Amino acid sequence: MMRNRQRLYGLLAQIDQGIEVLNNARPLPSHTVASLRAKLALDWTYHSNAIEGNTLTLRETKVVLEGITVGGKSIVEHLEAINHSEAIHYIEDIVANQEPLSEWQIRNIHSVVLKGIDQEHAGVYRQENVVISGASTIPPDHLQLRDAMADLIDWYQSSTDLHPVERAAQLHTRFVKIHPFVDGNGRTARLLLNFELMRNGITPAIINEKERATYYEALDEACVTGDFTLITVLSADAALRSLDLYLNVLGLSHGQDQAPDHVKPKGPGL
């Protein structure tokens, strides 16, 4: 356990340090940043959907987002890619406008995720009880959902002392444990994870579909024990991969070996 915490502290220090280097180099080349944002958004859409069973490849996802239909793939899989891309744009707008997180925003994000796929349940809290396959915990009774979501927002508003990566990972995990919607909870949770990172100027954490088993195990441990270390390590690792891509493409280095406990970012993460 101590080793995991030490690893987490090291990752957070690297992220703070890298963001400081990035911020000190602003303004960044606009075309380079645009290409980085497009790559990360595509990767994020592909991997988040693949975790949930979407069979589009990365290249096929790119083609779909360019408006081309891929033969042999369902309409739902096409819509999952298009909707997720639109949901990224939506949270970018929330971040750019410095809008606070609210239940209304969460429901709007989910509405975009399920648009045209399950319109009846898009942005609507479930009205029945569910279980999560492979999970050790059972989500709250549907009659308790409104209280559970209100408690989530209360926790979020009172957790500003956490490092942004820790807060993002916990927001994501606490939402998953509530599982407020019939479908689309995983995609929405990962959008919330990156909403919190991006609003603090940190590059998005893209959970790789090859990490699916480790990801689910880390989520389950956090939901059962209340120890968020492993899911935060996984999130920090993913955010650092995106940050390293930025720094490498821009020809920047991490700089000094030591970084302050928390560097206040100056701009949006993407």
Image: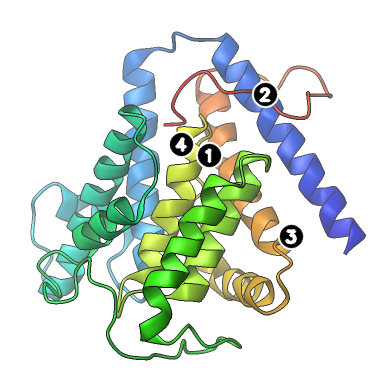
Labelled pair 1, 2 in contact (Cβ < 8 Å): no
Q: 15 or 35, which lies in front?
A: 15
112 sits to left or right of 139: left
Res. 59 in view: no
What residue type is disc 2 on? Val
Residue 146 location, quadrant: bottom left
Q: Earlier in the sequence, mark 1 or mark 4?
A: 4
Give me the C-alpha separation between circle 1 and circle 4: 12 Å
Give me the C-alpha separation between circle 1 and circle 2: 18 Å
Q: Earlier in the sequence, mark 3 or mark 2?
A: 3
Q: Which mark is residue 242?
A: 1
* Image point (57%, 25%), residue name: 247
Asked if residue 59 is positioned above or below residue 28 in the image, the reply reads: below
Q: Residues within 10 Å of mark 2 (few under 14, many from 20)?
A: some
In which quadrant is the N terminus drawn? bottom right
Residue 20 location, quadrant: top right
- Secondary structure type for disc 4: helix
* Image point (32%, 47%), residue name: 42
Labelled pair 3, 2 in contact (Cβ < 8 Å): no
Q: Earlier in the sequence, mark 1 or mark 3?
A: 3
- How has the structure been colored for display? rainbow
The residue indicated by pointer 3 is: 229
